[in-house]
Image: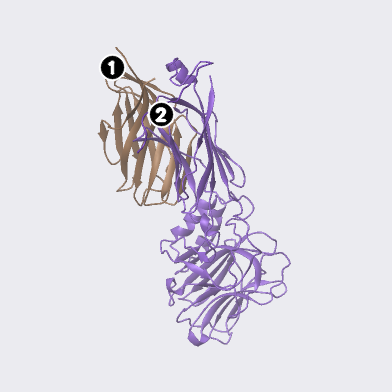
Chain colours: A brown, B purple
Amino acid sequence: MSLLVVTQPDFLSATSFRFVVPGHQQWELRTVRVDVFRAVGGAPGRGYALTFTDGTTVVASAGALDAGSEPGTCTVTWCQAPASAVASGAIGIVVAPVPALVLKAGYEIIGAIENPAGGDQFELPAVWVDFTLTD
Amino acid sequence: MALYVVRVPDPAPGTDWETMVPGQYLYNVTGITANLTPNVPAAGVIADATPNGHDGSYDGQPVFVTGVALPDAGASMGDIPPNPPATFGAIDLPPDAIDPTGSVTAMWWFRRTPGDTLTTPVVLYGFKPAGTIRWQCRLEETAPAVFRMLITNGNYNARRDAAPLPDDGNWHLLGFEYNAVTQHGALYVDGTPLALTVDTAGPANVATLDVISYGRSSIFAPVLHADVDEMALFNARLGPAVHAAIYAAAANGFASYQATVLAQGPATYYHFSSPGLLGGRQVGLRVTDGTTEVGLFGSGFPVSYGPPPFRYSWSPTASSNSQSSTGSITTVAVPPLVIPAGYTVGTFTADLAAADQWSNIALWWSDDVQRSEDPNLRYQYPPGALLEYHQIGTQP
């Protein structure tokens, strides 16, 4: 077992981020987490999507709910656990289920805010994996 | 495989707990338990839930009243900690948040003791100096007790009487409106406007609103055996649709209800509950690699308002989250947590108050993964091993 926390995405914008499995690696996914600053105007249509591709084709996806009053922050964790979305005022905590995926080199993990408000901002995305080196 | 229990020391009051996997260990977490006890500060202060940050204070008997912000049917939150008998004296609400020249809406949850007799009316009212012009929202003991509204010029010439006051021992949402444009008012019970008996006299002109007092009909007398909660005052006439929506939101849980009330921009909003339970105590289990958070796992339930302590159990093998009806026991399903040395596990509690206390924290882990990764466990001693302690040097 070789646990690794990857904090440097290949791409990060206000409403999107992307991690790419490097060459000669294989990732067994543990969690994907991200903070979201939520501006006024996104509720109730705002949501979060996590998409997995093989570099070309979508192979899996997982949605997550939004939580908390606006403006505020929400922490979203995709993992192998039941879904939940709770909040205390402007602080939201969301969990969304994803299967125990094994991702090969070149696979992508893409996060996006659906129906964002102007001013929404992804912050500090991170992927926790068990990685192995491959030929 | 061996199972171990780590007892995490209680953190300081008002702080979350955290524990780190020690060096050369690899925990396969089997379960985590902990208790959260919100502590109530000294009596006498009602904290305002609005951003105004405006605190009220009790006048008269300094007791808290019990409060359940939702009707009994379908409620998702339980009673907050019981308090002494709910006979309350007058509660002076700070007047400066209310616009004295405009429309006003007041709403609050109310539960009277069945069969209790009101000795004198309970009044929510505003008046000018010298009391010449005023509006009143009164709970009067006639046969049966009524929820009444007065808009007067001091001579009680304009009265709009309401239907009987609910007396079934259940919580009900009461609402009162004064429309400064029409100089008419309205009364609501459970989001529904009441048909009123209208006096033929003309309405009064309420020019100023200098004070709002709740709970007394005169300056001196405490009057009612009942419970009240969640009083919200608005510098506007909200109208029947909003009253209905606020009442409907209560059926979806306290978080939904509070959000709906706050969305209307109340000038003041008092929970009238144990102030230690103001914020909500939304608990998340937080896992880091020592530097970066790798997961924050919430419970999936609205904030708890039941009697403390609140017991949490995090389980990697549970298939769903669950919570007892009072919110006192919550089981949270978390993903498998195989965490090496240097990783931390702890809580992040939104709105944790200064006097809150985490306690009885235990982390239960298995060494099965560690054994498979490293059969030669660093800290395993064969039977009969003799450990000798030698002190090197002395401390000056």
How many neighbours does mark 2 have within 10 angstroms: few (below 14), some (14-19), or many (20 or more)?
Answer: few
Q: Are marks 1 and 2 in contact (CB under 8 Å)?
A: no
**SS class of the residue under badge 2?**
loop
Mark 1 packing: few (<14 Cα in 10 Å), some, or many (20+)?
Answer: few
| Circle 1: element type | loop
Residue drawn at (60%, 78%) of the image: B217
Task: Work out whether disc 1 and disc 2 sit on a shared chain.
Answer: no
Quadrant in the rendering for residue A57: top left
Decide which of B321, B177 is in the foreground and name it. Answer: B321
Tell me if I can see residue B337 in this picture.
yes
Q: Which chain carries label 1?
A: A
Left of B369 or right of it: where is B252?
right
Report the disc number at residue B391: 2
- Give percent across and percent down for residue A79: 43, 31
Q: What residue type is labelled 2?
A: Gln
Provide the residue designation for mark 1: A24
Identified at 45% across, 14% down, the residue is: B375
From what the image shows, is residue B337 above or below residue B207?
Answer: above
Write down the chain letter for disc 2.
Answer: B
Q: Mark 1, mark 2: which one is toward the viewer?
A: 2
In the image, A46 versus B320, the foreground residue is B320
Q: How many marks?
A: 2
At a point 55% along the width and 30% down the height, the residue shown is B319
